[in-house]
Amino acid sequence: MGRQVVREVVIPYSPREQFQAFHDRQQRWAVIVAHRRAGKTVACVNDLIRAAATSEKHNPRYAYIAPLFNQAKDAAWSYLKEFTDPIPGREYNETELRTDFPNGGRVRLYGADNPDRLRGIYLDGVILDEFGDMNPRMWTEVVRPALSDRLGWAVFIGTPKGRNAFCDLWEDAGKDAEWYRLMLKASETGIVASDELAAALKMMGDDRYRQEYECSFDAAMIGSYYGSLIEQAENDKRIGVVPWEPLLPVHTAWDLGLDDATCIWFFQVSGQQIRVIDYYEASGADLTHYVKHLDKKPYKYGDHVLPHDVKVRELGADSARSRLETLQSLGMRSARALTNQRVEDGINAVRLVLPRCWFDRDKCEPGLKALRQYHREWDDDRKTFGLRPYHDWSSHAADAFRYLAVGLNSLPDAAWNKKPDYSRLNRGIV
């Protein structure tokens, strides 16, 4: 047999000095918080390319995941093709946004908006870009299990957007030696010219500048509908232990997803207090699943508040029934649909209601994160926020809470319509 010839392939990537330690890391897990235009996506795409092209595993699989599939395409696909172009024998699949290498390795782009594409696959390494814009369950329920049997690695990257799951990840990683952490602030890297940073600060304002360029998790979440009100609830100690009161009925407010998540808030009304005692979220389940979940709780239920479109009769084998009628047939006799209202009116209703709310911190944690994250859509052309909410993983919990706020006035709890007793409100919950 002839001697095997090993060919060295040079790709057109030269790491910035700020990312050299990242490429040399030994830890299985990593988190990078970096300012805009620092080059984190380019560095991470090349980390995937090196791993996939040189792996000696059988059919190694690597992934880049963005909050939306179109974001993954816009952010990473051109980079993936540019830096793999010199590799002989590589092949591209434009439909699936993937690159296959001669050794059987593969890098594929995904969107967190379609988690079903990732279910059931295995991964040897993954980049989760702008993790703060994803539903945190994407990691725990979908991506993390895909890494287990191959002992794959993961890197979380992004720019701060308030104290959300990405912030929690950054802080937790600092307490664990198995994690690599890197924070790149524009004032320290020198990547963006100082006069450009000064111009950006003047145009963007302090909060947005600190968030986008100085990696501040404490800057106000720009465009958030409810962030300041949730922060006020924290300051007022209205987020903590909120016990279930057996003498009061437990009402629920739902947002029912078809392909998206279904979210349910559990709350009780006592005078002017709204005690939000529980929260549940799941996806890919039928209505029976949610009714059974409610039945497992010890609560005595009052009304179940649902969006207006549950009255629509669905096509299919059971076309004679709407989802409202299906829920009622499953035992939810007090399920009722709201009238159709403008989203803007519902958002204003939430803003009026939140100062009267107490939240159980542990049981409502996923829902509270969603309320903090829920924000207006950014118009990149006009450099301003639009009038409509940005649709992402936080929208479903926020919509369900909007139905809670809108449906309050029609609840049978007579005390709700009385004049507010602010002295009682300020005493909180014992």
Image (spheres, helix red, strand yellow):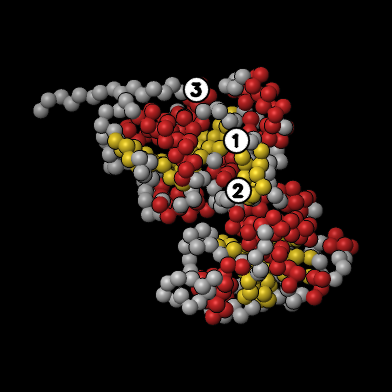
Query: Mark 3 highlights which residue?
Result: 16
Q: Quadrant of the N terminus?
A: top left
Query: Mark 1 highlights which residue?
Result: 381
Q: Residue at x 23, y 24 (%)?
A: 6
Q: Is residue 224 left or right of residue 134?
A: right
Residue type at numbered disc 2: Tyr
| Dot in front, 1 or 2 | 1
| Disc 3, SS | loop
Is 127 located above or below residue 243 in the figure? above
In the displayed image of the protein, which residue is found farthest to the right?
Answer: 423
Q: Is residue 382 left or right of residue 141?
A: right
| Dot in front, 1 or 3 | 1
Q: Is residue 307 left or right of residue 287?
A: right
- For marks 1 and 2, the one nearer the N-term is 1
> In the rendered picture of this protein, how many numbered marks are placed on residues?
3
Could you say where residue 111 lies in the image, as x and y percent from the top left?
Answer: 46, 46
Query: Mark 2 highlights which residue?
Result: 390
**Separation (CA) of disc 2 from disc 3:** 33 Å
Residue type at numbered disc 3: Arg
| Dot in front, 2 or 3 | 2
Q: Residues within 10 Å of mark 2 (few under 14, many from 20)?
A: some
Q: Residues within 10 Å of mark 1 (few under 14, many from 20)?
A: few
Is 188 located above or below residue 172 in the figure? above
Q: Residue at x 57, y 40 (%)?
A: 173
Residue 107 appears anywhere in the view? yes
Could you say where residue 89 lies in the image, as x and y percent from the top left?
Answer: 25, 31
**Separation (CA) of disc 1 from disc 3:** 29 Å
- Residue 45 got which mark? none
Q: Is disc 1 in contact with disc 2, using a CB cutoff of under 8 Å?
A: no
Q: Is disc 2 in contact with disc 3, using a CB cutoff of under 8 Å?
A: no
- For marks 1 and 3, the one nearer the N-term is 3
